Image (spheres, grey):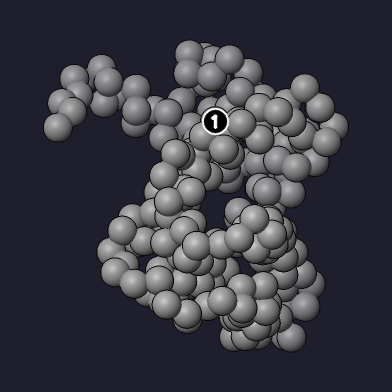
Amino acid sequence: METLGKQQLRTRETQARLLDAAEKVFVRDGYEAAQLDAIAAAAGRSKGAVYTHFKSKEDLFLALFENRTRAYVERLVARLKQCRTQKESMDAFRDFFMELLEDKAWPILTMEFKLFALRHPEWKKRFRKAFELAKGPRWEADEEGIFGPLSGEEKMDNELAIVALGPILSGLILESHFEPGLLSERGLQRILGRIFDALFPLRGTE
């Protein structure tokens, strides 16, 4: 078990506070308008502390993306480890995505990340690499545990479905801010559940 010294603990605490503050400011102001002064103030730290831990606003933005993505992947993998059958794994995968409806900040951040990558092509590869690293080397085995053995064509269709599910989820949550009556929490769950089941028709097989 890793034992951390006081300095390491302070460093981790400061980084965590800065990332939490950055998320709030980026969601509230958008990437372009967000200021490091505001992030530092929200974290209860100086602007100098931001530069001690992150090279630039871009670096902080990338770190936030990596941190959030890694946390989600680790949560999913931990849940899958408890499953004993393919059906249990698929149900866990479905439940995981349904629970993402509770995170109202992530769709806004995702939109900011993608707009930033489009406007700054030199960062696009770094964001993609960060996402791949966050998935980790176990994802291929976890994927087979969820969906079972797939042919080359089935695997390609499956990857397309996985890629599509994230933007669909984000779009629905964003739209719920404009249509709260129709896209209520219950409405979102119903439509996302139907979309998930349509994208992954192998659900429930052994």
Judging depth in this view, the residue of 61 and 123 nearest the camera is: 123
The residue shown at (50%, 39%) is 134
Which amino acid type is marked by label 1?
Ala
Across and down, in percent, residue 58 comes to 67, 25
Q: Where is residue 172, by image quadrant?
A: bottom right
Q: Nearer the viewer, residue 42 or 82?
A: 82
> From the viewer's perspective, is residue 136 above or below residue 60?
below
User: Which residue is pictured at 74% across the width and 49% down the height?
Assistant: 111
SS for dot 1: helix
Q: Residue at x 68, y 48 (%)?
A: 110
Q: How many C-alpha atoms fall within 10 Å of the one at disc 1: few (<14), some, or many (≥20)?
A: some
Quadrant containing the N terminus is top left
Task: Identify the residue under disc 1.
Answer: 63
Res 44 seen here: no
Image position of 66 (left or right of 57): left
Q: Looking at the figure, which quarter contains the C terminus?
A: bottom left
Q: Is residue 189 left or right of residue 3?
A: right
Residue 169 horizontal side relative to residue 98, left or right: right
**In the rendered image, is residue 201 in sight?**
yes
Residue 132 at x, y = what percent? 57, 38
Q: Is residue 156 above or below residue 9?
A: below
